[in-house]
Amino acid sequence: MNWARLQLSGKNGLRRDREKKEVLAVKIDDVKRICVVGAGNMGHQISLLCALAGYQTVCTDISEEQLNKARGFTAQYLPERVAKGKLTKEAADAAKANLRFTADLKDAVNDADYIIEAAVEQLQVKRSLFARLDELAPPHAVLATNSSYIVSSKVADVTRRPAKVCNMHFFNPALVMKCVEVVKGPHTSEDTAELTMELARRLQKKPVLLHKEIRGFLVNRILSVLSREAMSLYDLGVASFEDIDSAVENALGHPMGPFRLMDLTGIDLAYLSRMEGYAESMNPTDMPSPCVVAKYSKGEYGRKTGKGFYSYS
Ligand code: 3HC
């Protein structure tokens, strides 16, 4: 929004300016309804996390199969937490009542105060989605992307509310990992960044704020240095992926080695994010490593498909 131009357009312009700003202002206590777009690896857990924190939550996906998997996860997870003594029966029932699933995007976003996009890691898909979300969502709603690498300025420009667009990046498994990266782009308002930090705290997370946009943010940039080297050592035949994982787990104390972790976060995500990076830089060293390409082309994406580097029953 070009505020300067609005202010120059006389009294009516000033009134429009004020009205617009009022519509734009959302306080954390006004956030009651959250919509999570995407019921995949991240979306199903982010939506349950929001429901557990007391938000009226809708999880939407174009795939009924994905929605059914997310429903199934919730139906299994909540009683398990109760049985484990980690959640009261009342809290589990409340979370269940707070969460609904639908394939109808319009229905999912039409009264949302905050929208978290957790769709596939492909820029063009995200751009089309953000244009649609901007059309369907109330004008006050914030549009955040849970993208692993893509900065929000790449999607903010298709909306009429760039000040209300930011990155809100969760880690896998989202119900467990405490960190959330909030990235403030040049278009993101202070209010949106602060609101997002506070929302993350209310979801029981420990958010970190990036004042500048950078592809991959903090964590995935740091992690990719380690996993790139691990994949190169494996591709060169220096050691098996099991031994590389074992070395990282037992020498460095990481909870999971890089291959086990890729199986958790998704080999499809590793492939697509590297391809997106390569499309941007045109630097061949940014292409996915041969072992990732081989797994991706066989459809072996990790835990979600039952097979990645390891096999899962
Ligand atoms: N979903 C939900 N909860 C899970 C889970 C899952 N997939 N896996 C484990 N948990 C929970 C368990 O219920 C248990 O909870 P409790 O202690 O409250 O009862 C707790 O996590 C510990 O589980 P386990 O004892 O079964 O297993 P571990 O101790 O081995 O922990 C782990 C599992 C938490 C996944 C651990 O191995 C870990 O921290 N791994 C590293 C994860 C990581 O690095 N994530 C970041 C990846 S990068 C990323 O996400 C970027 C993004 O852009 C893709």
Image (spheres, helix red, strand yellow):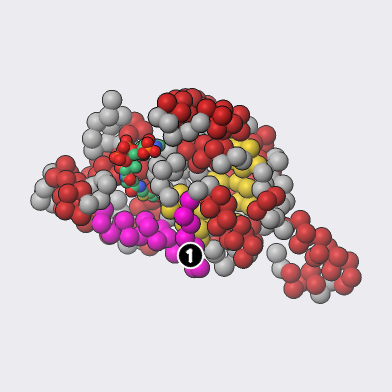
How many numbered tags mark residues here?
Answer: 1
Which three-letter amino acid code belongs to the residue tagged 1? Leu
Query: Quarter for ligand 1?
Result: top left
Q: For residue 144: magenta?
A: no
Q: Is residue 205 above or below residue 284?
A: above
Between residue 310 and residue 289, name the one nearer to us. Answer: 310
- Residue 276 in the image, given as x and y percentages of width and height: 40, 53
Q: Which residue is drawn at 61% across and 57% down?
A: 195
Q: Is residue 29 left or right of residue 62?
A: right
Quarter in which the C terminus is drawn: top left
Q: Is mark 1 within 8 Å of ligand 1?
A: no
Q: Residue at x 28, y 59 (%)?
A: 225
Query: What is the span of residues highlighted in magenta in the rendered image?
Result: 205-227
- Residue 105 visible in rendering: no
Between residue 50 and residue 16, name the one nearer to us. Answer: 50
Q: Which residue is drawn at 72% across and 51% down?
A: 139
Q: Which residue is drawn at 40% across and 29% down?
A: 84
Q: Is residue 205 left or right of residue 307?
A: right
Q: Residues within 10 Å of mark 1 (few under 14, many from 20)?
A: some
Quarter in which the N terminus is drawn: bottom right
- Residue 26 visible in rendering: yes
Q: For residue 206: magenta?
A: yes
Q: Name the residue under label 1.
A: 210
Q: In this view, does 239 lie above or below 296?
A: below
Q: Is residue 20 left or right of residue 263?
A: right
- Residue 298 in the image, given as x and y percentages of width and height: 28, 34
Figure quadrant of residue 159: bottom right
Furthest toward the right, the residue is 11
- Residue 150 in the image, given as x and y percentages of width and height: 46, 55
SS for callout 1 = strand
- Residue 130 in the image, given as x and y percentages of width and height: 59, 49
